[in-house]
Image (spheres, helix red, strand yellow):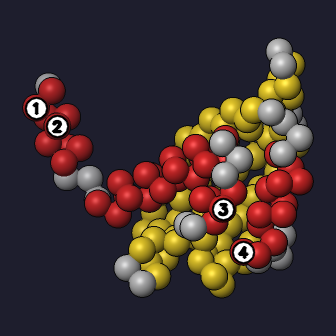
Amino acid sequence: MMAFLFVISCHRDPDERLIKAILEQIRQSTEQKDFDACLTFVSEDYQDNLDLRKHQLKERLERAFLGYPRLEIHHGISKFEKQGSGIRVVLKFKITGVQGDRKERLFGGALLAKSLTVDFEKREGEWKVVNSTIEIRRGF
């Protein structure tokens, strides 16, 4: 059984592994509030469904998260698909701001379930985020 799992993991798409590694680096950088590191994975022509451009993302991230001494981010990929020369990833996630022993859910959960769709394209040989769409659903 272990040999079978090893063979399957070796045959995974190398681009999928790279994208997952990038998403993990973005998660860690966001938890550490190193927003400049997050933006290294974003293309210069990025635009999201809120009409934010790359140069506006850092300010938005700082406003949303700097008030919390610590962040906890949990995410899982619900969809991973190739689209032409790019890759689309749909994430379900939860972000919690922590102040002392008080935790405040910022995003995610049963009452405010969110998904984030992230589009990647290769730019100068590296995968970059070119677009993202955040979806908010209220209720169960």
* Mark 1, secondary structure of its residue: helix
Tell which circle, 3 or 1, labels the residue nearer the N-terminal end. Answer: 1
Indicate the quadrant where residue 65 lies.
top right
Distance between mark 1 and mark 4 Cα atoms = 44 Å
* Mark 3, secondary structure of its residue: helix
Q: Which residue is found at the position 58% from the left and 43% from the top?
A: 28
Task: Select label 3 or label 1 by which is in front.
Answer: 3
Residue with the mark numbered 3: 36
**Number of numbered callouts drawn:** 4
Callout 1 touching callout 4 (CB < 8 Å): no
* 10 Å crowding of disc 2: few (<14), some (14-19), many (20+): few
Residue with the mark numbered 1: 3
Residue with the mark numbered 4: 54
For the C terminus, the quadrant is: top right
Task: Select label 3 or label 4 by which is in front.
Answer: 3
Distance between mark 4 and mark 2 Cα atoms = 39 Å
Q: Of the numbered discs in the image, which one, if any, rests on residue 6?
A: 2
Q: Which residue is found at the position 77% from the left and 66% from the top?
A: 57
Indicate the quadrant where residue 118 lies.
bottom right
Q: Which residue is found at the position 84% from the left and 61% from the top?
A: 60
**Residue 116: x, y in percent?**
68, 55
Task: Kindly tell me whether residue 4 is visible in this rendering.
Answer: yes
